[in-house]
Image: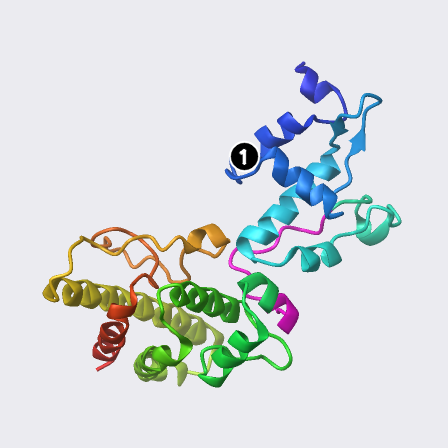
Amino acid sequence: MNASHARPYLGIGEVLASLREDFPDISVSKIRFLESEGLIAPARSPSGYRKFAVADVERLRYILTAQRDQYLPLRVIKERLVPDAADPAANGRPAGAAPGPPGRGGRGVKLTRRDLLEAAGIDEEKLAELEDYGLVRREGRQYGPDALEVARTVAALAAYGVEARHLRAVRAAAERETSLIEQVIAPTLRQHNAAARENAGRTARKIAALSLRLHRALIEAALAEAGLPGSGLPDTGLADTGLPDTRMPDVGLPWPGHAGDEAAGAPRATGRAAAGGGGASA
């Protein structure tokens, strides 16, 4: 039997090896940071080396999954974890263990204002501006994951001089496209049964995905017509923030050019982007 499986704990190198397939960016420094923040507390050998039990590894997996898929701040993740000092029988889990893995995409996650500011890396003034221009909306006293995605994308655009006030046309175009989709699926929704509603939801997302694809193609054509060099829209780098790559289904058609984020672009393209969105909904 392999020695690493015979003993009841793993060294930090073995923990890295077990997690790296799902979390390529995991590192010793990342694990040490999570320990310093009080999210994990592995035992120590007499010589001072960290000893990770199975529960420690599962706890780590939960933390990394919550960061990647739900993009939650560490403070929120810490609150959701079972404390190491808790009753071992709490919630049917051993002390230090994590709850079940969060779902991909994190649709059910709600964020407080503080959570949103921390996760998006913006200040109160910027968030108030996003709310004023209707780019971010609260759900009661909390925010959904879409608000975080919008806030992060707008913050990335700000680095190129694009401000929230420049994006009103983009928001208006999105609303027009949504109205078009609602008109298309209205006959299905009138059937008033769960199966019809589910089918309408799938259809709506496929139409939205195709609309985004058309929007992208129109922007690429407009940039080429303007004589700007380059081929395809580049990756914006937002994937590194832990956001899902896309929330739209695969509609079975190849993407033209470079497969990057839908939000790519420079300030000069902002006006054309809005025009493209409006064209898609015409």
Q: How many marks?
A: 1
Residue at the image point whose x is 54% and y is 51% from the top: 68
Residue 42 vs 155, above or below: the answer is: above
Q: Quadrant of residue 271?
A: bottom left
The percent coordinates of residue 227 (x first, y second) are: 11, 62
For the point 81% across and 43% down, the residue is 94
Q: Seen in the image, is 208 located left or right of residue 68?
A: left
On screen, residue 252 above or below 169? above
Label 1 sits on a secondary structure element that is: loop
Q: Residue at x 63, y 43 (%)?
A: 61
Asked if 254 appears above or below 4 in the picture, the reply is below
Asked whether 179 or 29 is in front, the reply is 29
The answer to whether residue 143 is above or below residue 90 is below
Q: Which residues are magenta?
A: 98-116
Comparing 65 with 150, the one in front is 150
- In percent of width and height, residue 67 lies at 58, 52
Q: Is residue 112 visible?
A: no
Q: Which residue is mark 1?
A: 20
Compared across the picture, whether 97 is left or right of 85 comes to left
The verdict on residue 111 being magenta is yes
Q: Tell me if I can see residue 60 in this picture.
A: yes
Label 1: few (<14), some or many (≥20) within 10 Å? few
Q: Position of residue 100 (x, y in %)?
A: 67, 51
**Quadrant assignment for the N terminus:** top right
Whether the magenta-drawn stretch holds residue 106 is answered as yes
Q: Residue at x 39, y 81 (%)?
A: 165
| Magenta portion: prevailing SS class | loop
